[in-house]
Image (tube, helix red, strand yellow):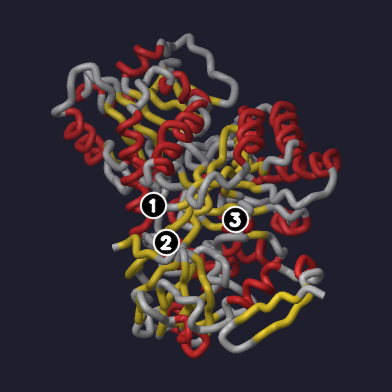
């Protein structure tokens, strides 16, 4: 009989070669690497308070990293034998460590571009709005477009801006300034003229051209009506978009974000080609040239589902350690701030307005059915209570038609849910992809637009969703809100809007570990990345964040901390 001898530092094993194929490869690997001298970690992280987001071992004080992945995690005695020649040690000095944050909803390149455009986020006075536009246009070439956004009319009392605010200071430059939610924008009169928008221009399906009492366009365009102007804005150069990715990635790392789910620059009215151009011209370039700094999971316009399917068949979902192909996204409605989210009852400030169905129901169903039948993950934007029920009903029909499987349907935002709807997310295994910081802006406006009773019953139901076993994934929707996971976690825990003393719907507050999980392991599961990401577990990628605090109890009580350092694949990426 042939005998094979397998040697390690402490054991000799005699095996028949006939039995070798029957052994598990992982067992052989563990056998070969069991000695302290045969495996050496690249990095030992010690003397910390590590929250792992792994229910099997929630806390640890040390971990070992090799080749960008976690080799072992536990107490110091369990990893010290992995130290050897060349091993670096990171002594945390008691600091709290958490897995790298996964922002479940961003528009990464669009956000990077907006960082160098007119920034109107936080502007709370009309004269400041006008001043920022005036300063920006001063040194511009005649005829070039002035772009920017982030304005929120609720911050200055609710009055919507109109073209006449800025026409006198921008007579030779067309202007487009998007609202903070991305579902409304302001064009000056020159931009309206270039786009051919007049008193006689009809509202497009899924959009509104806002008009004064005389029927003249005010300059404000909602949802798909934005395309009337956007189609005339020159596309940003490839070089500028590549610079935007680098700029945005550095910003994300500064906030502890190591992975993002990028929903592209696709919003109602935008060209569906934008996401594909960014994929080919920017992400693929960055991956091949070594410029990727954070991991991205990409979603594409649902209209192009067959194109994505072809790509997945050719490449698989994992293009590299940096780029994953997620799925497809579509829109059901607009936003609360633009009075275009779809509700069962009308807006109080517009008694005849129930919101907008952005995508026609039959078309949305057919695209979802085909996308899901092909095995693609589906994500749909829904904010109003009626829009959320409409999508949940549709998802139920698709499951009935295509059969059961692990599909992880997503609803992006899920901000306002009718009584009983929160429980349906868990029952139907739907991902609620939500952005806590939106409630800071929406609290006052929701009460004005929906009334106290409706707003109190159905807004940002974090606790109710978790109680119903829904998968809750947190993100920012950047550049609608800033990338700031730690701020969002505190918002989910405290729910205290700016200027308020008490919580808005205190019963919907959640605990620190629940909010952390929504930014880590649940966020990874929500887009099928939990094999590699989301928790500090052996075998997973070593993405982690060192926080400023050395007290878990204070962090759990107050939710306050800042990012001290960010590591991607075991390498320091910030600062």
> Percent x, y for residue 171?
22, 18
> Percent x, y for residue 41?
45, 75
Quarter holding residue 256: bottom left
Identity of the residue drawn at 71% across and 26% down: 363
Disc 3: CA contacts within 10 A as few (<14), some (14-19) or many (>=20): some
Identity of the residue drawn at 35% across and 81% down: 91
Separation of residues labelled 2 and 3 (CA atoms)? 15 Å
Work out which residue is located at the far front of the displayed protein and give it: 1
Quarter holding residue 147: top left
Separation of residues labelled 3 and 1 (CA atoms)? 17 Å
Q: Nearer the viewer, residue 297 or 419?
A: 297
Q: Is 488 drawn above or below residue 183 in the view shown?
A: below
Identity of the residue drawn at 55% across and 83% down: 35
Q: Which mark is residue 568?
A: 2
> Percent x, y for residue 355?
59, 35
Q: Quadrant of the C terminus?
A: bottom left
Q: Is 107 drawn above or below residue 100 in the view shown?
A: above
Identity of the residue drawn at 76% across and 40% down: 394
Disc on the earlier residue, 3 or 1: 1
> Percent x, y for residue 277?
46, 29
Disc 2: CA contacts within 10 A as few (<14), some (14-19) or many (>=20): many
Q: Which mark is residue 293?
A: 1
Q: Quadrant of the N terminus?
A: bottom right
Q: Is residue 566 left or right of residue 76?
A: left
Labels 2 & 1 near each other (Cβ < 8 A): yes
Name the residue tied to disc 3.
Answer: 529
Q: Nearer the viewer, residue 243 or 143?
A: 243
Q: Which mark is residue 561?
A: none
Judged from the image, the secondary structure of the residue bearing numbered disc 2 is strand
Judged from the image, the secondary structure of the residue bearing numbered disc 3 is loop
């Amino acid at each position: 009989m042939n005998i094979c001898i397998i040697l390690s530092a402490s054991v000799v094993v005699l095996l028949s070669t006939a039995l070798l194929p029957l052994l598990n490869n992982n067992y052989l690997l563990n056998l070969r690497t069991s000695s302290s001298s045969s495996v050496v970690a690249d990095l030992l992280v010690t003397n910390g308070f590590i929250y792992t987001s792994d229910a099997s071992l929630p806390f640890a004080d040390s971990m070992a990293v090799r080749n960008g992945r976690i080799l072992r995690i536990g107490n110091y005695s369990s990893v010290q034998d992995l130290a050897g020649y060349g091993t670096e040690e990171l002594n945390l000095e008691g600091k709290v460590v958490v897995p790298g944050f996964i922002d479940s909803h961003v528009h990464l390149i669009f956000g990077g571009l907006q960082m160098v455009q007119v920034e109107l986020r936080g502007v709370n006075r009309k004269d400041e709005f006008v001043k920022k536009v005036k300063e920006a246009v001063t040194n511009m070439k005649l005829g070039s477009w002035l772009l920017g956004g982030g304005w929120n009319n609720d911050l200055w009392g609710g009055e919507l801006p109109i073209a006449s605010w800025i026409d006198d200071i921008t007579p030779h430059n067309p202007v487009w300034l998007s609202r903070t939610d991305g579902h409304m924008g302001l064009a000056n009169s020159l931009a309206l003229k270039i786009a051919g928008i007049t008193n006689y221009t009809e509202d497009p399906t899924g959009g509104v051209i806002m008009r004064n009492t005389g029927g003249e366009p005010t300059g404000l365009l909602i949802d798909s009506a934005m395309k009337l102007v956007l189609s005339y804005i020159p596309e940003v150069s490839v070089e500028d978009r590549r610079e935007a990715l680098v700029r945005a990635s550095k910003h994300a790392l500064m906030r502890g974000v190591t992975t993002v789910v990028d929903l592209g620059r696709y919003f109602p009215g935008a060209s569906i080609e934008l996401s594909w151009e960014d994929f080919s011209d920017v992400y693929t370039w960055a991956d091949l040239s070594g410029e990727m700094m954070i991991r991205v999971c990409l979603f594409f316009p649902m209209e192009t589902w067959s194109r994505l399917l072809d790509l997945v068949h050719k490449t698989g979902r994992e293009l590299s350690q940096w780029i994953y192909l997620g799925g497809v996204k579509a829109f059901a409605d607009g936003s609360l701030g633009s009075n275009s989210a779809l509700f069962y009852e009308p807006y109080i400030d517009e008694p005849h307005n129930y919101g907008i169905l952005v995508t026609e129901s039959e078309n949305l169903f057919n695209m979802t059915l085909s996308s899901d039948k092909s095995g693609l993950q589906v994500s749909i934007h829904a904010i109003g209570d009626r829009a959320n029920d409409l999508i949940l009903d549709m998802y139920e029909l698709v499951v009935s038609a295509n059969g059961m499987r692990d599909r992880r349907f997503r609803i992006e935002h899920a901000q306002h849910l009718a009584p009983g709807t929160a429980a349906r997310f868990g029952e139907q295994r739907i991902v609620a992809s939500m952005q806590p910081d939106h409630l800071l802006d929406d609290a006052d406006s929701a009460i004005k637009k929906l009334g106290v009773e409706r707003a109190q019953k159905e807004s940002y139901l974090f606790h109710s969703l978790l109680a119903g076993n829904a998968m809750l994934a947190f993100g920012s929707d950047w550049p609608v809100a800033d990338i700031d996971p730690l701020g969002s976690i505190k918002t989910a825990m405290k729910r205290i809007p700016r200027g308020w003393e008490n919580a808005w719907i205190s019963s919907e507050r959640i605990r620190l570990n629940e909010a952390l999980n929504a930014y880590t392991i649940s966020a990874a599961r929500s887009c099928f990345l939990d094999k590699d990401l989301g928790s500090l577990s052996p075998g997973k990628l070593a993405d982690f964040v060192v926080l400023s605090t050395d007290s878990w109890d204070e962090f759990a009580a107050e939710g306050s901390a800042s990012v001290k350092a960010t590591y991607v694949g075991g390498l320091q990426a910030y600062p």
